[in-house]
Amino acid sequence: MNHVAWSFTGFYLSAVCFLDCTLLSKVSRLSLGDNIVSLNGKWQLVNSNSTFSISAEVPGCVHTALQRQGVISDPYYRFNDLAYRWISLDNWTYTTSFSLPACVEGKGKVVLVFEGVDTISTISLNGVTIGTTDNMFRRYDFDVTGLLKNQENILQVFIMSAVAYASQKSQAHTGYRVPPDCPPPVQKGECHVNFIRKAQSSFSWDWGPSFPTLGIWKGVRLEVFNSFRVLSFTTSPKYNSSWSVEVELFFDVAVASKGLVHISIPLLLSEAEFQLSLTPGQGEKFFILQVNQFQNVSLWWPFGHGDQRLYNLEINVKLDSGETFKAQRMVAFRTVELVQELIPSSPGLSFYFRINGKPIFLKGSNWIPVHAFQDQVTTDMITVLLRSAQKANMNALRVWGGGVYEQDFFYNLCDMYGIMIWQDFMFACALYPTEKDFIQTVRDEITQQVRRLKSHPSVVVWSGNNENEAAIATDWFNISVADRPLYVKDYVNLYVNNIRDIVLQEDSTRPFLVSSPTNGVESEREGWVAQDPYDPHYGDTHYYNYFTDCWNWTAFPRTRFASEYGFQSWPSLSTLSKVSVSSDWDFSSNFSAHRQHHEDGNQQMLKQAELHYFLPNSTDPVQRYRDTIYITQVTQAQCVKVQTEFYRRSRSDIIEGKGHTMGTLYWQLNDIWQGPSWSSVEFGGKWKMLHYWAADFYAPVLSVGIEDKGDLLIYAVSDRQSEQHGVKAKVKLYSWSSFNPVCSLESNTTTVKGGGSTLVFQQSISALLSQCGNCTRRSCIATFHLSSAAEPISPHNHIFLSSPRHAEGLQKPNITFTVKDAGVVQNFAVTLHCSFPALYVWLDVDDVPGHFNLNGFLMLSKKTTVIFGAWRPTSIEEITANLHITSLRDVY
């Protein structure tokens, strides 16, 4: 893996308070109307009995405001998620006052826009109730024409406890139960989250805390206009023998008007002008810009398959009255297809994505909310995570359906980085009510979100929910046979008759799946709820098994697409120490139990680890805690590596009708707080061992070694579209007690198929050990890589011939190190020296942010140099003082 220094490009999309008339006139040309008055900034916040009356930022939430004013400490600290439960059980009111700038006087219509309220609110202006909100995920517009004064307008937003509201809605639903009622006790959460359109994980999840937030989490503004405003606009590039871009403008019109719309893509010398006729009310207008056929259009490709070319598209609306609207958007040209078709020698159907006509293997992970308090999510946090995904050779992320639709910045960056997005709608692990008011707010939510996100080339598929088809099909909630048709009817009503119907109307450029996992078109054939949504012959699968030995690749389902799988680990001590005290640093402490929200999760980690490793036994409790964290990360990395490599080499295989795997999205990329989870990146951005390994097992060309029926098999897996000629597998066996290979072999020259998996080496392990003289399964390890023209073309890989706990000759390596400047700004060379071969060599620099070019590795030489790239100014002295080095043999 080559080291590349980190560099971040900033896209800071900040809201500004536009009360100056000059600013107003400038911004209006790039905004959604004639004049915009931002109401973001300082508001007053008071609870139900006025015990607390504080200043609060908008956008923001109650927890953040209380923390910033010193009323509470860090909600993530130790047991504060329970100590601060009272905040979410209270009602809160936001209040602001404002005057209108003179330049907006005399305008014909004024609309008050809330981009996002969390969640249940009643809004009043100058003492008049103007509306309510019941959905965190949608924008609300209120006509306040005639209610405003030039001076001292009072705007109040009364926010009801989401917990109380959800409980009331559940109690009012008397016809039949809508499970689940409450999360498992281990999650320490709140009940009936499925009755409120809010981030489902905010009431708790198995990887996160219960913080049912309240607040005005997105911007607030007044839009003041005479004739019209643009509510939103979309751009949809389409290909039909030539490229065109369909532009859709959504208008709110006060006065009938005529004018012109000019649309252009300057770099492609493409432009057109259209007549515009507007009638009062809300509506949309479609325009099709034909791309100049004499221009060479560069396509947008997923990361690793080509460039991510983006073109600037400009829109200029000019009415006969002189009113104007101007906007710009980056557009990309790409096609996406979800291919579900017959496979020779296999029952069922394929399930893979074709981008620009080429099959693409999706490599990536699942994305959860970056923070429990969305107002604290910064562009830097998102950039670090997406850059980390790309550096681990990922080309796809699934935005999971129990969190939030991410902010625009996230999708903009995915467009730039070539990271494809599997976009869930926000429904997860539950059944949902289908009353008229619930369905209507969902319809508004889906419409707005599809219009907001459909212009992004990174979004390649919509999915209606997370695991809700499986919940009904496999009876998660103990529904009687007699009642099942009722729940299936509700399911179809919500996800098919409403959500799917809206998506198909709004977006014809990408596929829609009703659920994940699903059997795709087979689920549709079976009435949208398949008998077995986990059937590996169709669609995508989720698979978790903490009890079977994760080294046993034969236990994994040979699926068409693996959209969820994984294993837990604990984050580093430096991450945990920010929210704990030294008495917490014990695997059996109350803190460790409290932070674990997955039933028996801590024991599952240790039991899985104990299958192949000795558990840490230091007499120093803090060292034992640090070592136990280390062993959980080793176990997680090894388990996910084995499973992912199995899926990648199954790309070309059809075994007993199963295989043709075309995607792996392990659970999960990021953390929402400092605690044990399935993530590969800790809260704060630090990489776990798994993430370092992901860079290798997601490499464009990969060598995979397995043992099958006593043979060592090595496969070459290639994402490249063209064949690779003249490839050899180079194999070495090392004993645990020596740096010199016991023997070296290489395969015959093989042509490796493009976009597939090719067997390049096969030999009996017993014959191999005999050939290598002094080797036994316990005393030696096999390493290998692929080469072409004597040059390595894949990362180095290895396979254990027995469990490391049975390794004979594995010594404590006595690793020492020196740190020097690497010659690149904020890059440092760490040179390691050891006495014996070392396994799972792990470097940790505590709180110094950054990452190594290599970590968690097998050290088979006396000297190895790795590079640390820091994300902030640091020094040789700081790194030297904070560097901890651990290998497997050091922990017992």
Image (spheres, rainbow, N blue to C red):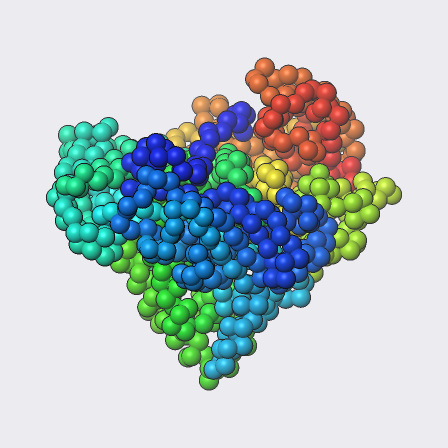
Decide if residue 701 is in sight here.
Answer: no
Residue 408 position within the rendered picture, expressed as x and y whole percent measured from the top left? 41, 43
Query: Quadrant of residue 145 in the image?
Result: bottom left
**795 is higher (above) or lower (below) than 596:** above
Q: Nearer the viewer, residue 293 or 718?
A: 293
Q: Please identify the quadrant where the C terminus is shown.
A: top right
Residue 193 left/right relative to 141? right
Kindly give the residue lying farthest to the top in the view shown: 823
The extreme bottom residue here reads 482
- Judge from the rendering whether residue 723 lies leftward or rightward of residue 369; answer left or right: left
Of 831 and 674, the residue lying toward us: 674
Q: How many marks?
A: 0
Q: Position of residue 564 (x, y in %)?
A: 51, 54
Q: Residue at x 69, y 58 (%)?
A: 82
Q: Residue at x 63, y 62 (%)?
A: 49
- Asked if residue 800 can be seen in this view, the reply is yes
Location of the N terminus (image quadrant): top right
- Tell me residue 859's x, y (percent): 67, 30
Residue 724 picture quarter: top left
Say which quarter of the image contains residue 625: top right
Q: Is residue 173 above or below residue 542?
A: below
Q: Residue furthest left?
A: 275
Vertical arrangement, residue 539 with respect to residue 19, above or below? below
